[in-house]
Amino acid sequence: METAEQLMRSRYTAFTLANGDYLMKSHHSSTRPIEEKKAIEKWAKSVEWVRLEVLTTTKGKATDTEGTVTFNAYYFDQGAVEVIHEKSAFVKEEGNWMYLGLAED
């Protein structure tokens, strides 16, 4: 059974592949940015992804219904290394982990 961290890792892979369909499918229905799909794909293709570093997770196990994953995603953009630092919130929707959005601290 999948965990929130596994979903986070698969979403990172989807960004590296600019797989907008998966990013939309794994995004919670209440916050899914359908109208931004093409822009997300375009941006994801415009950078060179380096690595994902998972820093912490809270809850998010197979038996939980919510959890958070704090991570750094490194990428090259116009010759410089950039980092996305985010604490992401995940919830289960119909039994599946879904990305909800930024978690509140």
Image (spheres, rainbow, N blue to C red):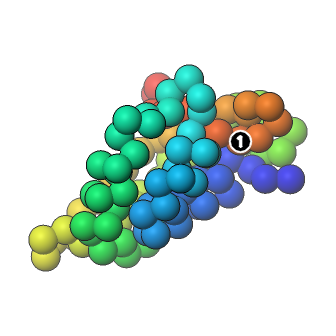
Q: Residue at x 59, y 61 (%)?
A: 9
Q: Tell me: residue 61, above or below residue 71.
A: above
Residue 77 visible in the snapshot: yes
Where's residue 18, x and y in %? 42, 63
Q: Position of residue 90 (x, y in %)?
A: 62, 36
Q: Residue at x 75, y 50 (%)?
A: 3
At 43% from the left edge and 68% from the top edge, which residue is drawn? Answer: 16
Q: Residue at x 29, y 58 (%)?
A: 42
Mark yes or no: residue 53 visible.
Answer: no
| Most foreground residue, 39 or 27 | 39
Provide the secondary structure element on which disc 1 rests.
Answer: strand
Residue on which disc 1 sits: 97
Residue 72 place in picture, x, y as percent: 41, 57
Q: How many marks?
A: 1
> Looking at the image, is 76 positioned above or below residue 92?
below
| Residue 60 found in image quarter | top right
Between 54 and 78, the one lying in front of the other is: 78
Q: Is residue 69 above or below residue 55?
A: above
Query: Is residue 103 shown left or right of residue 38?
Result: right
Check the image and name the residue furthest to the left.
78
Disc 1: CA contacts within 10 A as few (<14), some (14-19) or many (>=20): many
Q: Is residue 58 left or right of residue 83?
A: right
Rendering coords of residue 75 (x, y %): 30, 68
Query: What amino acid type is highlighted by mark number 1?
Result: Trp
